[in-house]
Amino acid sequence: MDDATVEALGLLSQAWEMTQRARGRLYDFHQMTGGADRMVGEAVRALRAAGHPEQAGLVEREVQGADVLPGMWTFQVVEAYDAGYHRRFAEVERSVRQALADGRDHIAEAEMKQRRETL
């Protein structure tokens, strides 16, 4: 395989790996927001127990269980990302590797490993 193709596939691979990291951060966002929402529920109960029903009601109405994006909870954001951009990127990346490298992955890294082992 020519060097230009190896470089191009390496860049696409790096972009795919970065996307995988972004997806992980999205799951972090999902789990952290869910954890925060559970704490908000505890805060609502604590506010009521402390004699502050008005403030408890405000937090409960405006924050607890609220959409993080219009019409969406975090699980829906994750699902939309997975079903859209992430799936499309995975399919295209796999297709390009299949067409140019018989489906092999990490070609640039494999060549680097081979060069370093023969030094």
Image (cartoon, helix red, strand yellow):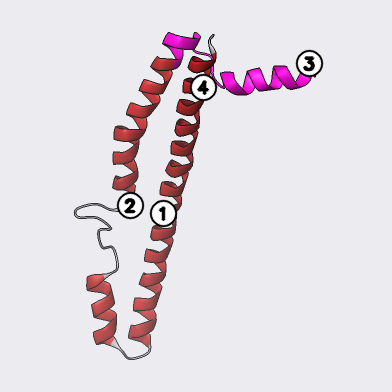
Q: x and y percent of residue 19 in the render? A: 43, 37
**Spatial CA span between label 1 and label 3:** 44 Å
Q: Would you say the magenta stretch is mainly helix, strand or loop? A: helix
Task: Give SS at disc 4.
Answer: helix
Q: x and y percent of residue 57 in the render? A: 24, 79
Q: Where does label 1 land, which residue?
A: 29
Q: Label 4 crowding class (10 Å Cα cut-off): few <14, some 14-19, many 20+?
A: few
Q: x and y percent of residue 80 in the render? A: 28, 40
State the image quarter where residue 111 is shown.
Answer: top right
**Relative to 82, does residue 27 appear above or below in the rendering?**
below
State the image quarter where residue 86 is shown.
Answer: top left
The amino acid type, in three-letter code, at marker 3 is Thr
The amino acid type, in three-letter code, at marker 4 is Glu
**Spatial CA span between label 2 and label 4:** 36 Å
Q: Where does label 3 land, which residue?
A: 118
What number is the disc on residue 7?
A: 4
Please give left or right for residue 77 compared with residue 21 in the image. left
Q: Magenta part of the protein: which range?
A: 97-119
Mark 1 vs 2, N-terminal side: 1
Circle nearer the viewer, 1 or 3: 3
What number is the disc on residue 74?
A: 2
Residue drawn 36% across and 28% down? 89
Marks 1 and 3 in Cβ contact (< 8 Å) = no
Q: Nearer the viewer, residue 10 or 54?
A: 10
Q: Label 3 crowding class (10 Å Cα cut-off): few <14, some 14-19, many 20+?
A: few
